[in-house]
Image: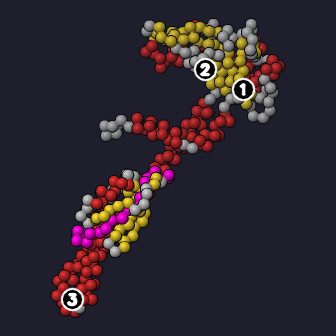
Amino acid sequence: MVFGVRIKPFVDAWWRAAGEIVPAWLYLPLFKHRPAHTLNIVAPEQPGGIAFSAMSDPEALRAVLKQRSGAPAPINVTFAEGALFTREVRIPRAARNEADAILSLDLSQAAPFPADEVLWGLGPWSRKGSELVATQYLIKRARFEGLRGALRSLGYAPRLVRPAIRNVGRPIYDDRARLDRAYRTWGAVTAVAFGAACLVGVWGLSDRVAVGEAELAALNMRVEELEAQAVALRNNRAAAAEVGAGEGDVFEAILADAGRVKSLQNLTALLPDDVWISGLSLNNQTLRLSGFAGMASTELVPLIETQAWASETRLTAPTSRDPRSGRERFELSFSLVQTGAP
């Protein structure tokens, strides 16, 4: 909690977003770990696999699986009903999170052989009153090691060993921790890359803002210089009239220039932040604009037309949607009203 605000939901949302936008090629190295083989071990009287009594025999396994060479191939092993020792277990509903510790302790007291010689899995939990009930599946560690040795001799490595049921609460053996670490590593890489991209975007935006502020400051300085020149010319208007009409024309041109610059400054302050100007031209008193707008371009016309320094505002070309930015491209023009410019 930071300044009284719980930040964990925001961190979780950030992590999920980073995992969803990551390019798919980042996860391609993980697909080679997906098991392509399955071995089903059944009770002696059942068809469809290899019998429990023969599961440690390489020759019996070779009849079911092809012998491989090279790095061990991952394989999933399932035990059919009747091929494992089972017992019903019960725990209080409130102790659901400590189920593994409770069942391990209970196993050392209830199993017909020492707990350290047993591997066990668990079926799905069901509620019965105030208790949770599940089926526990057990296999002797020595039998499992014999199966694993026989599979390795044929070029296979057990990745997941589980009972052949729809939902498994806990597998008998799970060697996917390496995959989990890989996914967490790639998730961290994704989050870091996503954060770096956001920082670069913020840095670029702040740089654009800084450039815009510098340009606006330069315009303000230009306006102040022109206003000072205009005031000086007003004070000397009588003298300028005696010199001749040529100096009077210069005076009027400087005043018009000051009004235009001020109108451009007002236009910059008027346009919303999601409007970008990509082109600007001034012919006499007609100002032409082109650019991209996050809002509807038709809304720009009344926005400018209501200003005292603009008139005859209109769109000069059909609008279109830019496919990259999603903004609307526009072209419009309006006349600068010289008497209305500050």
Question: Alpha carbon of mark 1 to alpha carbon of mark 3: how far?
Answer: 100 Å
Q: Is residue 203 above or below residue 135?
A: below
Lower position in the chain sequence, tag 1 or tag 2: 1
Q: Which residue is drawn at 28% across and 79% down?
A: 254
User: Which residue is at the far bottom?
Assistant: 243
Where does the image place residue 342, in percent across and percent down from the top left?
Answer: 22, 69
- Pointers 1 and 2 in contact (C-beta within 8 Å): no
Q: Is residue 136 above or below residue 302?
A: above
**In which quadrant of the rendered view does residue 50 lie?**
top right
Per the image, the residue denoted by label 2 is: 171
Q: Give the range drawn in magenta.
A: 323-342
Where does the image place residue 256, in percent across and percent down from the top left?
Answer: 27, 76
**In which quadrant of the rendered view does residue 306 lie?**
bottom left
295 left or right of 262?
right
Q: Residue at x 30, y 76 (%)?
A: 257
Label 1's element? strand
Where does the image place residue 205, in percent across and percent down from the top left?
Answer: 41, 56
Q: Can residue 186 be seen? A: yes
In the picture, the disc for residue 240 is 3
106 left or right of 222?
right
Lower position in the chain sequence, tag 1 or tag 3: 1
Q: How crowded is mark 3: few (under 14 residues within 10 Å), some or many (20 or more)?
A: some
Is 329 colored magenta in this rendering?
yes
Question: Alpha carbon of mark 1 to alpha carbon of mark 2: how far?
Answer: 17 Å
**As shown in the figure, which amino acid type bears the numbered disc 1?**
His
Q: Can residue 206 be seen? A: no
**As shown in the figure, which amino acid type bears the numbered disc 3?**
Ala
